[in-house]
Image (spheres, rainbow, N blue to C red):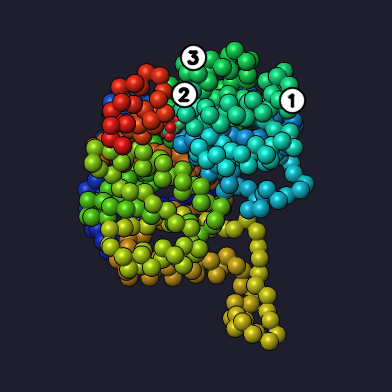
Amino acid sequence: MENIKLSIDKAFGFVSNESVAAYEKQVAESNAKLHQGTGLGNDFLGWLNLPSSIDEAHLSDIEATAITLRDNCEVVVVVGIGGSYLGAKAVIDALSNSFDWLQTERKAPVVVYAGQNIGEDYLYELQQLLKTKKFGIVSISKSGTTTEPALAFRLLKTQLEQQQGKAAAQKLIVAITDKSRGALRTLATQEGYKTFVIEDTIGGRFSVLSPVGLLPIAVAGFDVRQLVSGALKMEQVCGQDTPFAENPAAQYAAVRNALYQSGKKIEILVNYHPKLHFVSEWWKQLFGESEGKDGKGIFPAAVDFTTDLHSMGQWIQDGERTIFETVITVKESNYTTVFPTSEDNLDGLNFLAGKRVDEVNKMAELGTMLAHLDGGVPNLKIELPKLNEYYLGQMIYFFEKACGISGYLLGVNPFDQPGVEAYKKNMFALLEKPGFEAETKAIKARL
Ligand code: PA5
């Protein structure tokens, strides 16, 4: 079976082969720090060997819980924010029919999301929709205290209990949280919900291969065993003993740091398949929250092509030259659509007749890459042989490993997120949360 493939040759007009190769020693040291647990944030390395440590009983438990929800729900609401929902949404969107919500003959419930914002209209509209649906809730919060999901969960739990009765509702709620701490754990114990544990050593943005990602993905009807098996393959390929030239995570970490040092401060993740939009959102969190600290870090941005070639294309081609692109390309589409011939050819498109739509997309991709290289934008490429669970699993682990190595190359702790607390403190002060009296006084004086 093939693996996902990284190509970095289109960076070499901008940074030299030697400057990337010069990272070899540092990359090996960073990789070793991860495996030996001697680097910063070494209490958050549970993701490193996660694919090889998931056992049969755990996977069966996830699958059995997913079946219960699938058998009893038309809609399952995944409640979570940041790392507690982005991985699941990335995989589910990438594998789902693009018009999933319009499908009438369904094999799986529709998975929708809440707790990833505090939009009153969003929550109102969701609650209206759920009034006529049999729904369940997967509530995910490692800390169990995050405001956005806690607020959404209270609303939805109340609604579910009103619609189904307390006893039935209890069977339709699953909580994924810390093994002993946090309000969600307390609530789950008291209410008797089915629960899964997020290990202390796995941070939110590295948790997609834990129940945080696997349960929602299984509920949506996808093969979590294949996902884990793809990740396991990359765990092996990107291991500590793999030589630099054969280790895609090591190479990606090296080349993006070489580009960063040469002044390329922004990395744009590019896709040519709209289903991958949320893969980019997941990737943005993974790298943004891991590297953006201590006044350092590549800014992770993303575009969906060719759509955004008609909006951001101008900036990328011609704006400030501080960017590089990493293109996720899918070698083989899952379906075939051939462009038809037209007798009168009024649209002038007969030169495309007989070609697959994907061939046109691939030429757009190639043409764009060459144009952007001419415009001064280095290009990296990650090729997935196909869009399926196995290769998405490979891609997830590849990015996680590269992120850990890259963070250590940059000299930051890739596994904390101290900056996320600042807005929470202000929000609680403004909302006059008990315990925040001094902060409330201070913030009100600023207004
Ligand atoms: O990566 C992270 O740690 C964060 O994005 C968290 O996942 C996010 O803040 C949600 O936290 P929690 O799962 O504790 O509700």
| Amino acid type, residue under disc 3 in the picture | Ser
Kindly identify the residue that appears in the image at 35 percent across and 53 percent down: 267
| Amino acid type, residue under disc 1 in the picture | Gln
Q: Is mark 1 within 8 Å of ligand 1?
A: no
- Mark 3 and mark 2: Cα distance apart in space: 13 Å
Image location of residue 156, percent across then percent down? 62, 30
Of the image marks 3 and 1, the number of the one nearer the N terminus: 1
Q: Which residue is mark 1?
A: 164
- Horizontal placement of 331 versus 435: left or right? right
Which labelled disc corresponds to residue 180? 3
Quarter occupied by residue 47: top left
Image location of residue 189, percent across then percent down? 58, 14
Residue 425 vertical placement versus 341 (above, below):
above
Which is more toward the observer, 1 or 15? 15
* Mark 3 Cα-neighbour bin, 10 Å: few <14, some 14–19, many ≥20: few
- Horizontal placement of 243 versus 19: left or right? right
- Mark 3 and mark 1: Cα distance apart in space: 28 Å
Kindly identify the residue that appears in the image at 32 percent across and 31 percent down: 444
Which labelled disc corresponds to residue 145? 2
- Mark 1 and mark 2: Cα distance apart in space: 26 Å
Of the image marks 3 and 2, the number of the one nearer the N terminus: 2
Kindly identify the residue that appears in the image at 37 percent across and 57 percent down: 325
